[in-house]
Image (cartoon, rainbow, N blue to C red):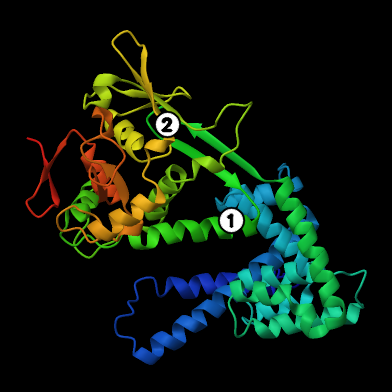
Amino acid sequence: MTASVWQPLRRHPVAAVVERLHAELDQHLDSTVWSMSHGEFVDTLASATRLVARMRELELRVAAGAERRDIGAHVGATSTATWWAHTSHTTRAAAHRSIRLARDLDTLHERVRDAMAAGDVLEDQASVIINAVDALPADLLDPEIIDRAEAHLIGLAREHDAKTLKTLGRTILETLAPDIAQAHEQRVLDEEEARAHQTARLTLTDDGHGRTHGRFTIPTAQAEIFRKHLLAIAAPKHQAATGNPAGSFAAEATGGLAPGERLPLPQRLGHAFMEYVERYPTDQIPDAGGVSASMVITMPLDTLMGGLKAAHLDTGATITAAQARRMACEAGIIPAVLGGKSQILDLGRTKRFHNKAQRISLAHRDKGCTAEGCDWPPGLCHAHHDPPWAIGNGTNIKDARLLCPQHHTLAHDPAYEMSRLPSGKVAFARRT
């Protein structure tokens, strides 16, 4: 009688290859790359990127199989995606996105899966192709055209990144079915615009510490106009700090900028947005309930004359005295000046602002910001009442000067002293 020898069951080829890859990578945990040649860097990096795509397809193939087998239910999880997120320490949102992609590759887009398995299509490209093909009007197209569209986009993925591929995917019908493309594009744009208008939202939340946070969703057309407006304000406004008072003020306000550095673009756009709001033509704001929508600042007379007491907006918000004086001087805002017993002494009218002819005269005379060392052009400057409008100064050419927004802020900041130079320029120095 011969004894039987127990033979272990062979591992599945996919499980075996994953195990071998782990073992192979373990052999190179400490390998450095400094000695690689230039050509090896180029070839290896490109090859590694393709390898990641191939491994990702393998991962998604296994995930699709686990989803079909409902592995999550076997371990008591609410879904396979939730179980996968827990075991792999990824987020549930990411796991659910991966399961959806795995399902699409497994059942509806096998050609895309094969291209990804070969390393010819990256994961983000695969998602773009799937979305573009699924968006095609199946009711208007033959299945053959849809198949050709998918194959065409897979071919384009060898030459274009996911962003460009997305644009090409939106116009794929112009190449394959131009007679249908125009009608389809019009239908898609109509649906997108209608949805964009229906979902337009804006929320503003005051955090109680002098800042308001906001989120908005608007149609792309209006967003592009808004972006262009802000870039037009931001582009020349926040240039490199180059040794003038405006530059040093910008450096101080932003924690210190080295010479030649610019503010980060999001911060420049934030400053541009503030100016955009302040400079909006108030005569174009509609009345609300028969009352002008112009903002009113309430402040004691001593605040307007240079005191430090805070001022209040008619919405209930509180702002600093310096900002109130600056806004009362230039922005389209009405100051309600109170006497000692909170009696209104003067309710300013927007006619105190310099008109177009006066601004042209100031530009001709001052040639730009009148702060020593500042080279801002007239079109970007504010008209500053000098001496201040608060002490009875009229709105005329004689008692006015051009100041850039930063120097205009300093002119109303009690921490700085503005002195007039024999040249007609002004200089600023921090008070000690």
Q: Residues within 10 Å of mark 1 (few under 14, many from 20)?
A: few
Q: Give the camera-side residue of 17 and 356.
A: 356
For the C terminus, which image quadrant? top left
Q: Is residue 300 above or below residue 246?
A: above
**How far apart are the two marked residues, 2 and 1, measured between alpha carbons?**
33 Å
Task: Tell me what residue is drawn at x 78 percent, y 75 percent.
Answer: 110
* Amino acid type indicated by mark 2: Arg
Residue 263 visible to the viewer: no
Q: Is tag 2's residue or tag 1's residue first in the polypeptide sequence?
A: 1
Task: Tell me what residue is drawn at x 29 percent, y 54 percent.
Answer: 362
Q: Residue 418, image x and y in percent?
A: 14, 41
Q: Residue 279, image x and y in percent?
A: 43, 46
Q: Residue 322, image x and y in percent?
A: 27, 33
Task: Tell me what residue is drawn at x 22 percent, y 60 percent.
Answer: 241
**In-image side of 314 versus 146 (left or right):** left
* Amino acid type indicated by mark 1: Ala
Q: Residues within 10 Å of mark 2 (few under 14, many from 20)?
A: few
* Quadrant position of residue 332: top left
Q: Could you say which disc has been placed on residue 223 in the image?
A: 1
Q: Residue 191, image x and y in percent?
A: 79, 58
Q: Give the camera-side residue of 394 and 411.
A: 394
Task: Tell me what residue is drawn at x 82 percent, y 76 percent.
Answer: 181
Q: Could you say which disc has been placed on residue 372 in the image?
A: none
Q: Could you say which disc has been placed on residue 349 in the image?
A: 2
